[in-house]
Image: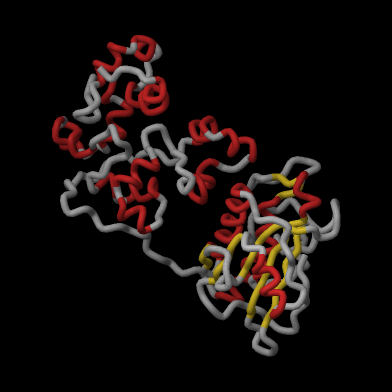
């Protein structure tokens, strides 16, 4: 629900629109001096709630020309989100308040408060919620819609319909309102990072490495599974920032530590590796040396096969080594249970062996 019905079409006049989680409590009263009715938030959003809010902002940015920037909570923020007591359980799930410059329709400030009384029944996934629960994600999309100037719509299937429905994605009616204010989404080139000076050229593979392994990701991250959040979406929005790994062979923290330029660019490290890094000779973990593998196995290099994909599918079965520091046959010889299980030895080492103190050779 929103606080006001505006007399004109409202929109942000600046870009990107800066948003933050309301964690700086003093700022509530500071902004309250300028903006009447500004909420006094009870608490900040949790990391899980924040992840869903990021997805909600992304939903609007994907379908229109608006852009957002997440910032630390402070005076520069334009949309703040947090938890507050609104009207008790079973009524308003969240509440958006916004202020604009008279006549121009330019939004000056906005705030979104999720009702603390209703959070016990919130569904923290992106799919339709189970019976008896409400979707935190779609509610966030709805309230952010208000925060960017969109009022309620009469289309009962729209996200911006004033009452909860089963819709989980923005409809044509929702999108039309966003495009009216901010134009169509721009087509931009993907973010790239310059290859290191000593990068070894690698032939483009004929088969791509798979995206996020949902079964692996959810098994390793039971909190994500319990929340019903899609594995790929979670990793792309919050998982990589939390140091979670998308597949068994890619170690997020290791990649960022080994590639400070990627870390400084603040881009998804797994996406960078798939799009650029694997062609530049960068390594997906500390135990797989892409350039070394290709130099040792000319047949793989000549075939233009992705070295990581080759080792994971066939290389280890052929007793090939992923790097000079990891001996495939020696590891299997020292760990007969791994050999008997028919498990990729490097995968076992990354997931279990290191933590268990197993011998490499």
Q: Nearer the viewer, residue 183 or 120?
A: 120
Q: Nearer the viewer, residue 45 or 164?
A: 45
Q: Is residue 320 left or right of residue 69?
A: left
Q: Residue furthest front?
A: 26
Res 13 seen here: yes
Total marks drawn? 0
Q: Position of residue 140 (x, y in %)?
A: 67, 58
Quarter containing the C terminus:
top left
As drawn, 62 above or below 237: below
Res 173 seen here: no
Q: Quadrant of residue 173?
A: bottom right
As drawn, 256 above or below 145: above
Quarter containing the N terminus:
bottom right
Q: Position of residue 101 (x, y in %)?
A: 67, 85
Q: Is residue 316 left or right of residue 13?
A: left
Give the colour scheme of this rendering: secondary structure
Q: Is residue 77 left or right of residue 94?
A: left
Q: Nearer the viewer, residue 112 or 358?
A: 358
Q: Nearer the viewer, residue 350 or 280?
A: 350
As drawn, 358 above or below 179: above
As drawn, 316 above or below 97: above
Q: Quadrant of residue 339?
A: top left
The residue positioned 52% from the left and 68% from the top of the image is: 67
The residue positioned 57% from the left and 68% from the top of the image is: 74
The residue positioned 45% from the left and 43% from the top of the image is: 243
The residue positioned 54% from the left and 35% from the top of the image is: 221
Q: Position of residue 257 (x, y in %)?
A: 33, 46
Q: Quadrant of residue 31?
A: bottom right
Q: Position of residue 118 (x, y in %)?
A: 79, 50
């Amino acid at each position: 629900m929103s606080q006001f019905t505006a007399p004109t079409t409202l929109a942000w006049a600046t870009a990107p629109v800066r948003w933050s989680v309301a964690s700086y409590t003093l700022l509530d009263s500071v902004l309250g001096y300028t903006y009447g009715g500004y909420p006094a938030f009870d608490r900040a959003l949790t990391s899980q709630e924040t992840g869903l809010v990021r997805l909600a902002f992304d939903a609007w940015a994907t379908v229109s020309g608006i852009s957002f920037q997440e910032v630390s909570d402070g005076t520069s923020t334009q949309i703040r989100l947090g938890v507050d007591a609104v009207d008790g359980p079973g009524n308003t799930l969240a509440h958006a308040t916004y202020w604009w410059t008279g006549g121009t329709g330019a939004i000056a400030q906005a705030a979104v408060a999720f009702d603390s009384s209703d959070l016990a029944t919130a569904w923290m996934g992106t799919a339709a919620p189970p019976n008896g629960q409400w979707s935190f994600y779609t509610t966030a999309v709805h309230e952010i819609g208000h925060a960017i100037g969109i009022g309620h719509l009469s289309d009962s299937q729209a996200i911006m319909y004033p009452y909860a429905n089963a819709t989980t994605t923005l409809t044509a009616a929702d999108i039309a309102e966003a495009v009216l204010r901010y134009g169509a989404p721009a087509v931009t080139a993907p973010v790239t990072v310059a290859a290191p000076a000593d990068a070894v050229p690698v032939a483009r593979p004929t088969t791509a490495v798979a995206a996020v392994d949902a079964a692996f990701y959810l098994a390793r991250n039971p909190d994500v599974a319990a929340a019903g959040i899609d594995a790929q979406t979670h990793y792309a929005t919050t998982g990589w920032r939390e140091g979670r790994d998308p597949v068994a062979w890619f170690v997020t923290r290791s990649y960022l530590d080994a590639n400070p330029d990627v870390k400084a660019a603040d881009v998804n490290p797994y996406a960078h590796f798939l799009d650029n890094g694997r062609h530049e000779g960068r390594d997906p973990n500390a135990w797989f040396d892409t350039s070394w593998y290709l130099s040792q196995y000319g047949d793989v290099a000549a075939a233009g096969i992705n070295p990581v994909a080759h080792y994971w599918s066939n290389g280890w079965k052929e007793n090939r080594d992923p790097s000079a520091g990891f001996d495939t046959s020696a590891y299997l010889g020292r760990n007969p249970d791994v050999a008997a299980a028919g498990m990729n030895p490097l995968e076992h080492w990354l997931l279990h062996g290191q933590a268990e103190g197993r011998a490499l050779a």
